[in-house]
Image: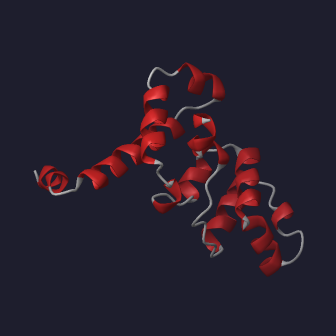
Amino acid sequence: SEAIVALVKLSSDQLDEIISVQSQAYLAKLDNEEQFESDQYRRLCLTIIGAKDTDLTKHWVMDIDYLKSNNKDPAIELLKQSGFADAYDKKEGEGSFSKLKKVSEIHGAVKKFSFDFTGFLPEPADYKNYLK
C-alpha cells in the first residue's frame, strides 16, 4: 500500500520521531493517574520519549476535539492555562469568559473565537516531568 511505501522512504530519525509522538499519544489516552501508573506499556513509552527528547508542541495543537474529551472544569482550566480566557476577555470584554456557564457555550466560544493554541502543551501531555 501507499502508506508502507511512504514509511520505507522515511529516514530513521523521522521514524524515531513518529514512534515517539505515537508513544505520547498512547500515554495521553490513559484516563487518570492510577491508570497511568499501572499501565504495562507506560515505562516503554516514557523510555522512547526520553531517548528521542521529542517536542510534542511541534506535532500537536490543542483543538476543540481535545477540549471535548475533558469535563467542564478541566476544559476551563486548559483554556485559562493556554491564554485563551485572557484573549477572549480582551476582545469580548472583561469577565466575558467567566460568563460562559454551559459546556456548549464554552465549546461555541472556542469554535468562533480565533485563537492560536500553537506551543501550548497541557501538563498531563508533558511526559518529560515523568522521566525525572
Going by the image, does 55 lie left or right of 107? left
Give the answer, above or below, for where 109 lies relative to 35: below
Instruction: Say which of 129 and 85 sits in front.
Output: 129
Give the answer, above or below, for where 97 lies relative to 15: below
Quarter of the image with the C terminus is top right
Where residue 119 appears, as percent x and y from the top left, is 59, 64
Give the answer, above or below, for where 13 lies relative to 37: below
Going by the image, does 67 lie left or right of 14? right
Where residue 123 appears, as percent x and y from the top left, is 66, 46
Q: Residue at x 65, y 28 (%)?
A: 33
Where residue 82 appears, as percent x and y from the top left, is 70, 61
Instruction: Say which of 63 and 15 sits in front.
Output: 15
Q: Residue at x 57, y 41 (%)?
A: 127
Going by the image, does 41 lie left or right of 84? left
Going by the image, does 96 lie left or right of 108? right
Check the image and tell me how it is coloured.
secondary structure
Residue 23 in which image quadrant: top left
Give the answer, above or below, for where 29 lies relative to 85: above
